[in-house]
Amino acid sequence: MTKRALITGVTGQDGAYLAQLLLSKGYDVFGLVRRSSHSEVTDTRLKWLGIDRDVKIVDGNLLDLSGLIRTLKDVRPDEVYNLAAQSFVKSSWQQPILTGEVTALGVTNILEAVRLETPEARFYQASSSEMYGLIQEDMQSETTPFYPRSPYAVAKLYGHWITVNYRESFGIHASSGILFNHESPLRGIEFVTRKVTDSVARIKLGLAGELRLGNIDAKRDWGHSRDYVEAMWLMLQQDVPDDYVVATGRTTTVRDMCRVAFQHVGLAMDDYLVIDPALFRPAEVDVLLGNPAKAKAKLGWEAKTSLEEMIAEMVDADLKRLSR
Ligand code: NDP
Ligand code: GDP
């Protein structure tokens, strides 16, 4: 029997790579897409990967429980991957209520729909290392206490615990992946890696003269989205649902990540980088460093792509996009 998967957030970075992975494994892939007046916006990432015709798009919104129930009734998925969210930390201070509605309560909506329609379906929740925020241990693992530092992180913490709660209350096969930052050529332009690689490509092509950043002392544990979606899938293949940290185990400053991007095109970062105080955040997550030991031991998962390889891939993709 062909397995059926429903991905919320299929138009996002991870949704696209996950859809590609599941298609390669022979799944019937359904993607929940919220209606937009711009049809092009909804399928650019799927098009980039050449799979826009292979994913079956279903109309829906994480805020609309009745629609989600109808979707599950129609699709009857074996696996549900909940990737949809207002996912940008900085925007969550501007739109804290929307962030709470989508990124927190939206998880309950989809879990309710699963419980009511397809309680036997396996469920994945996209949790985040941002939940560690003001870190309580140098290296964060599944047992490290959380201390969220943004409305986004607070919302994700709710999503994490409601997933655990539905597992414990109703026996749903629900797993929460605590993923550290992961990037790719399909990363949203507002996130720092992609902002950097896009700007570096523009500077190289003579289309821009500077790169403005905020806090370049912040450190992140950056991996590649293509690697991380594999961990999501592996979690749902386990007999017992559980929570896993997915990370590389290496942390790098924004400054050093940025230097890698400039070096890739043979330019000196200091000639172009401008620090803009307006880009600092009301509260910062200074450092994140994940311990992926459990994922390695139980899922056999490991990050494959180094930061240098990933940034080079992203700069090259941006050069290609801009040269078109
Ligand atoms: P993106 O921002 O690229 O994608 C978010 C997706 O959610 C988009 O498809 C978006 O649709 C969709 N969405 C937003 N609001 C709604 C809604 N109300 N109803 C239905 N769909 C909605 O995120 P990523 O792919 O990078 O991340 C995937 C998930 O993993 C997110 O939940 C994110 O918070 C989480 N995460 C990501 C990390 C990372 O480093 N990338 C780290 C840890 C967790 P549209 O195209 O219409 O905007
Ligand atoms: P986050 O970890 O989910 O918030 O991912 P981001 O890529 O948005 O930000 C990573 C880090 O880069 C944070 O500590 C930001 O404060 C820092 N940063 C510095 N300058 C910028 C910038 O111009 N844009 C973004 N998005 N982040 C920046």
Image (spheres, grey):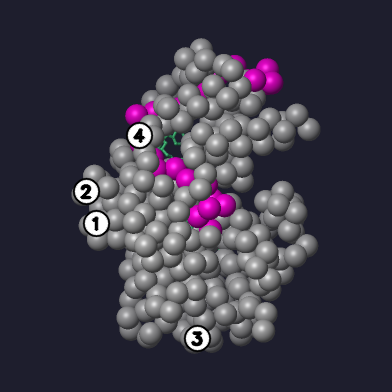
| Residue located beneath label 1 in the image | 144
Q: What distance separates the C-alpha of mark 3 from that of mark 2? A: 36 Å
Which numbered marker is on residue 120? 3
| Tag 1 and tag 2, C-beta contact below 8 Å | yes
Which numbered marker is on residue 218? 4
Q: Earlier in the sequence, mark 3 or mark 2?
A: 3
Which numbered marker is on residue 137? 2
| Secondary structure beneath label 4 | loop
Amino acid type, mark 2 = Glu
Q: What distance separates the C-alpha of mark 1 from that of mark 4? A: 20 Å
Q: What distance separates the C-alpha of mark 4 from that of mark 3? A: 42 Å
Q: Is residue 99 left or right of residue 294?
A: right
Q: Nearer the viewer, mark 2 or mark 4?
A: 2
Measured from the top left, where is residue 229 in percent x and y? 53, 58
Query: Badge 4: few (under 14), some or many (20 or more) residues near its Cα, within 10 Å?
Result: some
Q: Is residue 96 visible?
A: no
Q: Is residue 213 magenta?
A: yes
Q: Which residues are magenta?
A: 204-229
The image quadrant in which ligand 2 is located: top left
Q: Is residue 152 above or below residue 32?
A: above
Q: Quadrant of the N terminus?
A: bottom right
